[in-house]
Structures are given as C-alpha cells and as structure tokens.
Amino acid sequence: MNFNYFKNIAGTVTLALLLVIAVNGFAQNGNSDENESIYRDFKTELMWKANVKIGTMINVGESKRGTRRVIPITGGTFSGPKIKGEVLPGGEDWQLVRPDGDTELYARYLMKTDDGTVFQILNKALMHAPAPREEGGFYVKSVIDIEAPVESPYDYLNHAIFLGTLEMPQLKPNEAPYVIIGVYKVL
C-alpha cells in the first residue's frame, strides 16, 4: 500500500472540511443581524374568512396523549378579496386536549370555489386558555396547508405559507354552530 496516497487523501478531506466549516461560519455569523431582521415584522394578506358549520362533537375519550374528540365539518361558506365559495360537508376536526390543558386541532376538509374548483385544506392549530392569574389572554393560531389543482386559476395557493385565526362567535337562538376561520398569506 502507498502511504503517501492515503496521506494526500486525508489532507484533501481535511482541507475540504475546513473550507465547509469556514463557509458555514461566515454564512451564519456574517449576516446574522440582516437574516434575523427579515423575520421581525411578518406581513400578511387576508385571503378569505370562512364560516365553517360544525356538527355535534364526538368524544372519543382519554388516550395516552390526552382527551381525543372529533368535530364533523358540515358545510359553510368562504369569501375574500379574490375568491369565494362553499365549504363542503364531510371534513373533520380531530382535537386532542393535552394533559397541560392546551388543545391541538387538526382539521381536514374541502372547499369549492364559485367557479367549481375544489381544493383541500389542512389546518393545524393550537388553542391555549390561560389559567387563573396567568398573563396573556386566550390564544389560538394555526398553520394552514392548501392543496389546489395545479392547472387551475388557484395554483398560486400551492406556493405560499398561510397562517390562520379562529373565532367562536356567540350564537343566536336556534342558530347552527359554526366557527370563523381567517386565512392569511405570509408575504
């Protein structure tokens, strides 16, 4: 075996590793203030608000992760500056009330625009109600994944990150239960 051959390979690998470490260190440290500043003040654009009708909650019960429950999505409507339509029945909101009291929501449902295009919504949310004497108020926010047909006028929905809000309105007598979901594109 040729010892110099292995020595040259080891030297080349060491030099390559040092170069990678130097480049990564420069990229991470050289512009850290500039990189952090682009995330300080996120800007969003309202895409739509949806009035999502919900059915009677199914209490699955205690699990190893907390209390599991499912809420059927029975329909609704949505409207925004560039889009409107209906929430199709058949979706569900799977919820987990964790041992710490927070609730994780995972909703999956379909929406249909006025021109007949159907797309899928996956809405993952966290709901936190403050304990007595805890600072801050009620908190609920979500991350929304939208899957629209690629050859539709709504393909642009496949190329962005969306955040969501959830409101639970005070129902009027004999009014069917619903929630209001706001969908915002991160610019």
Image (cartoon, rainbow, N blue to C red):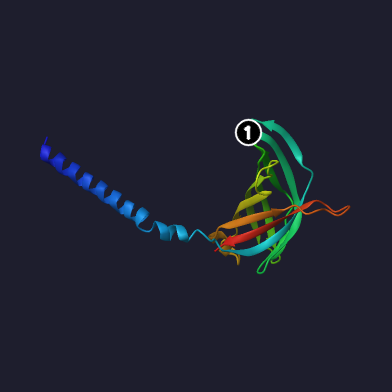
Count of marks overlaid on the render: 1
Which quadrant does the C terminus fall into? bottom right
Q: Position of residue 65 (x, y in %)?
A: 63, 33
Can you give x and y, in whole percent of width and height, for residue 113 in the image? 69, 63
Closer to us: 24 or 114: 24
Decide: is 43 above or below 29.
Answer: below
Classify 60 as above or below 140: above
Left or right: residue 113 versus residue 13 is right
Amino acid at the residue labelled 1: Arg
Residue where numbered disc 1 is placed = 65
Q: Is residue 36 left or right of residue 171?
A: left
Along the horizontal axis of the image, is 148 left or right of 7? right
Q: Is residue 116 above or below residue 96?
A: below
- Residue drawn at 67 percent across, 58 percent down: 182
- How crowded pointer 1 is (Cα within 10 Å; few <14, some 14-19, many 20+) is rated as few
Q: Residue at x 77, y 53 (%)?
A: 178
